[in-house]
Image (cartoon, rainbow, N blue to C red):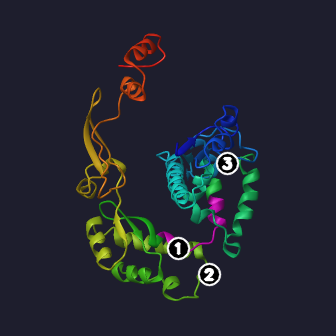
């Protein structure tokens, strides 16, 4: 056995004799990978965790004036799975060099922090506003504050820079365009292409007296200019100047996107009961050992018989298990 992946609450694996210490005594080369919700220690260690629960606990939410909204996909689960796969691959490589196995741990909470790395990091001289905001939050809701009040307070305390002009989504005459031009050379190019002036970016060291008002006015100016032309034309102009940008898409549009289809990022197949399906293709392309999605997901129990026969059980035993309802078969 090369790898054991455990997905229990802390302590459950030990109760079943499936913990790392027990299994590694029998096989010192074992790679033992465990995924927990909140980590193996601390006051929440024994608590169950689902993606949406951790999204709320970790702050990985889109908070609007109406309240928090969970991410549209279980991105914490996906990220934890990727971290687990990376850890297992690294441990297997290490074992090839040392001959020793090891355990590795991944937590949904840590995955959520990884996803928010740039916002979680704290630079004292820049981010000291957070302490005042956290203190405000202790009593805000109990005092009758709305989500709009909370967002306004955060906006009031945060340092203001013209970031949203250069990094984010802006309206055009027929849609929206996403732009990533935060580096100063890119900001200078964007000023030239779009046709606006930003003294704050143009003159290092200069700052406006009212950063909030300056940023709002600059954003309004830039979006007013962008609304004079189409997304396609702005994409062409900005891209030609070397500015990273792209038309904004909603996920419903991606199945028809030329770039997605040209690269084979989605696959068309038939399901036994649902009919036609379009699904995401295997995410890694190997030159020598290509992965293919050739069949749709099986129905529950569809391959139980084949798996048990391959594992060594005879047909009679499988039939008896099915007759007793111990296994599910078609």
> In the rendered view of the protein, which quadrant contains the C terminus?
top left
Q: Tell me what residue is drawn at x 29 percent, y 37 percent.
A: 295
Q: Quadrant of residue 132?
A: bottom right
- Residue 215's label in the rendered image is 1
Pointers 1 and 3 in contact (C-beta within 8 Å): no
Cα distance in 3D space between marks 2 and 3: 46 Å
- Residue density around tag 1, few if under 14, some if 14–19, many if 20 or more, within 10 Å: many
- From the viewer's perspective, tell me whether residue 85 is left or right of residue 257: right
Q: Nearer the viewer, residue 198 or 76?
A: 76
- Per the image, the residue denoted by label 2 is 209
Q: Which mark is residue 119?
A: none
Q: Main secondary structure of the magenta part?
A: helix
- Count the labels in the image: 3
- What residue did someone put label 3 on? 39
Say what secondary structure mark 2 lies in: loop
Magenta stretch: includes residue 268: no
- SS class, disc 1: helix
Please tell me whether mark 3 sits on a helix, a strand or a loop. Answer: loop
Does 72 appear above or below 219?
Answer: above
Query: What is the CA distance from the residue labelled 1 to the residue labelled 2?
Result: 11 Å
| Spot occupied by residue 24 in the image (x, y as percentages of width and height) | 64, 44
Instruction: Of the two numbered discs 2 and 3 on the same chain, state the one appearing first in sequence.
Output: 3
Q: Give whichever of 146, 1 is nearer the camera.
A: 1
Write the start and end of the magenta stretch as one range.
152-164
Which sits in the foreground, 88 or 277? 88
């Amino acid at each position: 056995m090369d790898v054991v992946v455990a997905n229990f609450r802390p302590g459950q694996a030990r109760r079943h004799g499936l913990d790392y210490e027990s299994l590694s005594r029998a096989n010192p080369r074992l790679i033992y990978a465990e995924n927990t919700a909140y980590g193996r220690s601390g006051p929440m260690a024994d608590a169950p965790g689902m993606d949406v629960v951790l999204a709320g606990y970790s702050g990985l939410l889109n908070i609007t004036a109406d309240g928090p909204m969970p991410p549209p996909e279980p991105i914490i689960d996906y990220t934890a799975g990727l971290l687990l796969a990376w850890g297992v691959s690294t441990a297997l490589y290490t074992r090839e060099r040392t001959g020793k196995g090891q355990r590795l741990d991944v937590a949904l909470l840590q995955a959520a922090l990884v996803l928010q790395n740039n916002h979680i990091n704290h630079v004292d001289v820049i981010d000291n506003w957070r302490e005042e905001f956290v203190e405000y939050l202790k009593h805000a809701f109990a005092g009758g504050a709305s989500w709009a009040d909370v967002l306004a307070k955060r906006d009031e305390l945060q340092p203001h820079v013209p970031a949203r002009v250069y990094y984010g989504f802006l309206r055009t005459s027929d849609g929206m365009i996403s732009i990533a031009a935060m580096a100063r050379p890119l900001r200078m190019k964007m000023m030239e292409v779009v046709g606006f002036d930003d003294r704050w970016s143009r003159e290092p060291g200069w700052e406006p007296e009212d950063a909030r008002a300056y940023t709002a006015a600059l954003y309004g100016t830039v979006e007013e200019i962008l609304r004079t032309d189409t997304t396609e034309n702005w994409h062409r102009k900005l891209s030609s100047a070397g500015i990273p940008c792209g038309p904004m898409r909603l996920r419903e549009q991606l199945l028809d996107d030329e770039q997605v289809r040209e690269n084979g990022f989605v696959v068309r197949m038939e399901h036994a009961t649902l009919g036609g399906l379009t699904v995401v293709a295997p995410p890694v392309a190997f030159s020598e050992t290509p992965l293919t999605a050739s069949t749709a997901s099986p129905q529950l129990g569809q391959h139980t018989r084949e798996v048990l026969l391959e594992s060594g059980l005879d047909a009679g035993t499988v039939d008896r298990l099915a007759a007793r309802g111990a296994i599910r078969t078609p």
